[in-house]
């Protein structure tokens, strides 16, 4: 018999499956809102000026591709850490933070999860209901039982804050709480700063372990503004895990540029923890790749390129906001009677549109418009050419 005879076919990734269906669709006006990628107004994945300039500078002085240190490029790590905690962070000054380069935000979550499994094997993990679909699988694969906490309220298209607080109150001490620090995926619904303050204080009071996931810094209100939640938790003196990603903010999806940052309570703790995190990395993939990390490090450490990048990122953020506004206006124009103002309040690339699975299916069949069956649409895939068609189609399936 064959070694693999009993291996069962794993379920398809729902979003990648949707892309395959979209690619096979021969209709000319088709639109893919199922993706998790930022497209520009021409419907292309942008190549940022800041990235191109950094690459030109790198090309002009060819460097040997030796192994990077296990933790990656030092200037990359410091740059990522500073973006999260702030240039004037006392935590950085006191040596209470460590950052390692990771294979995207996913890699940061994985290294963090593996280290947590070593540190708190008895703990359970809590993710928002709903959450990025890989959170559950990733923490389960690392050996944890994964539960959910109340988050989204379909009736108000907003946050179920009371439910979230009630969930936090049921968790035993040392439970691991995965939180989206800004631009919640998939809903686009974030707590207000007042609500975050209550959440953070409760997490501290109940001795829970925060794992902040921030994959869209710069897509909400701004680079600094979007780090407010991280800084709030830091200020309360909480030890925590932070997974961050430059995939979207640098439009460098395939380069796998992310970082895992841990905040500890002393410099001595930092060095011990770093030595253990390095062991986790060493036994996973040894050390990270060079190219993407170098590009990001070059941009973050050059005042001029940083400014170019920040401006380009602001452009992406503003375009998404503009698409939210146009979508709401055009839905009205095309006769939708429902109130879609909640779309303006949501942040980041995604919107939970409130469309049902049947309406999403009709969008696909009747209009060639693809969205996730949960009703999640990628606002960053809307543009001046497709917005009218999309709004009209949504208005039709809502009738
Ligand atoms: N966390 C969240 C909430 C995400 O949406 C994503 C990416 N879609 C990630 C983590 C992973 O980021 P990366 O693509 O850099 O691995």
Image: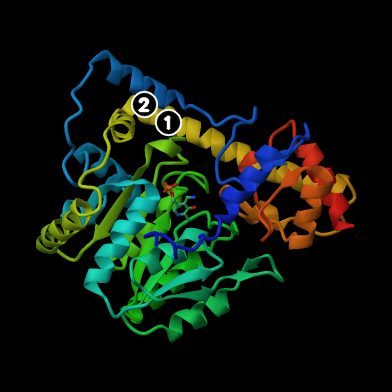
- Please tell me the numbered disc located at residue 368: none
Q: In this view, does 136 lie above or below 76?
A: below
Crowding near pointer 2: few (<14 within 10 Å), some, many (20+)? some
Tag 1's secondary structure? helix
> Where does the image place residue 389, in percent across and percent down from the top left?
81, 39
Q: Disc 1 designates what residue?
A: 309
Numbered label attached to residue 305: 2
Answer above or below: position of 269 versus 303: below
Q: In this view, does 87 lie to the left or right of 357?
A: left
Cβ atoms at labels 1 and 2 below 8 Å apart? yes
The x and y percentages for residue 173 are 32, 83
Residue placed most toward the observer, 272 or 160: 272
Q: Tell me the quarter of the picture where residue 152 sits.
A: bottom right
Is 213 or 83 nearer to us in this picture? 213
Instruction: Name the residue at 22% across, 53% down.
Output: 281
Is label 2 in a helix, a strand or a loop?
A: helix
Residue 266 sits above or below residue 15 on the image: below
* Residue 147 placement (x, y as % from top left): 46, 76
236 to the left or right of 351: left
Check the picture and name the quadrant holding the N terminus.
bottom left
CA separation in Å, label 1 and label 2: 6 Å
Which quadrant of the rendered structure holds the C terminus? Answer: bottom right
Residue 237 in the image: state x and y as whole percent.
27, 67
């Amino acid at each position: 018999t064959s070694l693999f005879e009993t291996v069962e076919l794993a379920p398809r990734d729902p979003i990648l499956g949707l892309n395959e269906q979209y690619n096979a669709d021969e209709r000319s006006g088709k639109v893919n809102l199922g993706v998790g990628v930022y497209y520009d107004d021409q419907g292309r994945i942008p190549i940022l000026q800041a990235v191109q300039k950094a690459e030109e500078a790198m090309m002009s002085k060819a460097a040997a591709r030796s192994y990077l240190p296990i933790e990656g490029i030092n200037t990359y790590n410091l740059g990522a850490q500073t973006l999260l905690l702030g240039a004037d962070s006392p935590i950085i000054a006191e040596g209470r933070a460590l950052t390692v380069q990771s294979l995207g935000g996913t890699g940061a979550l994985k290294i963090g999860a593996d280290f947590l499994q070593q540190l708190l094997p008895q703990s359970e993990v809590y993710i928002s209901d709903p959450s990025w679909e890989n959170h559950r699988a990733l923490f389960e694969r690392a050996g944890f039982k994964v539960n959910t906490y109340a988050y989204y309220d379909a009736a108000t298209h907003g946050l179920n804050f009371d439910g979230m607080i009630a969930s936090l109150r049921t968790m035993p001490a040392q439970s691991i709480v995965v939180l989206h620090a800004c631009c919640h995926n998939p809903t686009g619904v974030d707590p207000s700063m007042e609500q975050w303050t209550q959440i953070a204080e409760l997490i501290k009071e109940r001795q829970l372990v925060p794992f902040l996931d921030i994959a869209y810094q710069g897509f909400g209100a701004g680079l600094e503004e979007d780090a407010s939640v991280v800084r709030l938790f830091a200020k309360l003196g909480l030890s925590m895990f932070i997974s961050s990603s430059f995939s979207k903010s640098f439009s460098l999806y395939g380069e796998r540029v992310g970082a895992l940052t841990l905040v500890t309570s002393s410099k001595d703790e930092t060095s011990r923890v770093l030595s253990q995190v390095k062991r986790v990395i060493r036994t996973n993939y040894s050390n990270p790749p060079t190219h993407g990390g170098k590009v990001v490090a070059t941009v973050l450490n050059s005042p001029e390129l940083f400014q170019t990048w920040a401006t380009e990122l602001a452009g992406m953020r503003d375009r998404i906001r503009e698409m939210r506004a146009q979508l709401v206006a055009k839905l009205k124009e095309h006769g939708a009677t429902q109130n879609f103002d909640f779309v303006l309040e949501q942040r980041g690339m995604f919107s939970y549109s409130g469309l049902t699975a049947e309406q999403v299916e009709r969008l696909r069949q009747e209009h060639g418009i693809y969205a996730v069956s949960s009703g999640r649409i990628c606002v960053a895939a809307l543009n001046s050419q497709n917005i009218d068609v999309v709004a009209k189609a949504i208005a039709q399936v809502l009738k």
